Amino acid sequence: MTNNHIINEVLLNKLTLVFLFGFQFWFHVESSARDKYYTNAGSLTKPGQSVVRLMLNHRNDGAFICHLGLDTYAFDVLLRLFAKVYPLKSSIGRPRSFGPDMALALTLMYLHNSMKQETLCLLFGATATSISRTKALGLDLLEMIFRRDPHDWRWDISWPSPHKMAHFNDMILANTECENEPEVLKGVFGFVDGLNLPIQEPDDEVEQNAYYNGWKSGCYSSQVLVFTPDGCICYVRLLADAVFPCTKSYQEKIHRVPKKSEMKKLQVDDELRNRWKAITKHRQAAEWRMRAIQSDFGRLQLKLPADKAKRGQMLFVVWRLHNYRTRLVGINQISTVYFRKWEEQQEISSFMNMTM
């Protein structure tokens, strides 16, 4: 072997060592950059001594409504249904970290708030794995409960019957003040509006393009909701265009104020202006509910899962919890405004009939 071969072999060995040391250094730097820190069980109180356990034991209506969205009575009613389907042991036979009441509280708090998972870990005294597993199970069980009896009056979402439509129209007419309002609102029984909710960007480019909203510069899931004067949802359609419904046969049945670009093409007189004022006044009811839904369910303010099944499940549960909360708790601005006026008129009518 010549001297040149020996020199080349030595250089090759040195280059190999340099490469290995360099790769090892790079891997160490990358690993350090990727280090993640978790809340472990040793840094948490036990679930039985957690803040949420204390709240559940004290049973204060104000605290329940603030953190779970339901008062103690509504929570107990839902808990009885939830406990019947809640498995006390995991699939491998181990006892679960939470009982039915803690699991339901976790699911409701997750939907009601926009807090991070780390915060839920501190509040419930459980690791991130337990929190993720329990809230996923909770959503599955709530969906099962609502689907098992979809027409239960407490969470039912259904188009009102003609009798109910007439009743709702009476409630709306009871809240009229101007002379033209009864004529404009004759036959009106509900309020409709669209709701855009942010979602995570789907991996598929075609699907991502379908959800992309250029006006908001992001991916959004659009839905249309119809509310009745009692504050409940009577119709919901996912992935619907905001111009509900889009067929010409229904356009005359939806009262709306034209956009500015449309107004230029119309001959506007005082009668038409008064009509638009009446529509605008009562259209606020839909705005109240849209804001209330996003306030009552803070999770909707964050990006929803890109996965259709997970997102659909969450929204399915949220819409029915909204009706459940409205009917059992009763905190609802629409029903407060319209039902109170209608109730006052009914009392006056009853008093007048008694005195005649």
Image (spheres, rainbow, N blue to C red):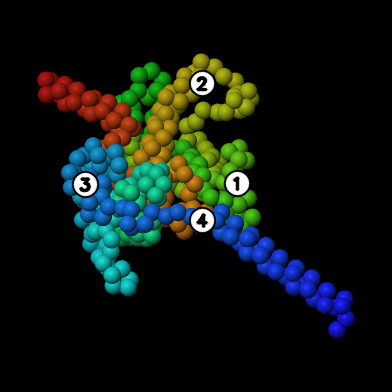
| Mark with earlier residue (2, 3) | 3
Q: Nearer the viewer, residue 339 or 88?
A: 88
Task: Point out residue 133 in the picture as x, y percentages from the top left corner.
Answer: 37, 60
Q: Write down the residue under mark 1.
A: 212
For residue 299, side relative to residue 219 (left or right): left
Q: Position of residue 170 (x, y in %)?
A: 31, 31
Q: Nearer the viewer, mark 1 or mark 3?
A: 3
Instruction: Relative to 65, say whether 336 is above or below.
Output: above
Front: mark 3 or 4: 4
Badge 3: residue crowd in 10 Å (few <14, some 14–19, many ≥20):
few
Amino acid type shown at disc 3: Leu
Q: Residue at x 42, y 55 (%)?
A: 38
Q: Secondary structure at mark 4?
A: loop
Task: Tell which tag, 1 or 2, sits nearer the viewer.
Answer: 1
**Secondary structure at numbered mark 2:** helix
Provide the residue designation for mark 2.
272
User: Circle 3 is placed at which residue position?
Assistant: 54
Going by the picture, which residue comes out furthest to the front?
Answer: 3
Q: Earlier in the sequence, mark 4 or mark 2?
A: 4
Instruction: Give whichever of discs 4 and 1 has the lower sequence position.
Output: 4
**What is the C-alpha distance between the residues marked 3 and 4?**
34 Å
Crowdedness of circle 4 by 10 Å Cα count: few (<14), some, many (20+)? Answer: few
* Amino acid type shown at disc 1: Tyr
Distance between the Cα atoms at labels 4 and 1?
33 Å
Distance (Cα) linking label 1 and label 2 = 36 Å
Which amino acid, mark 2?
Leu
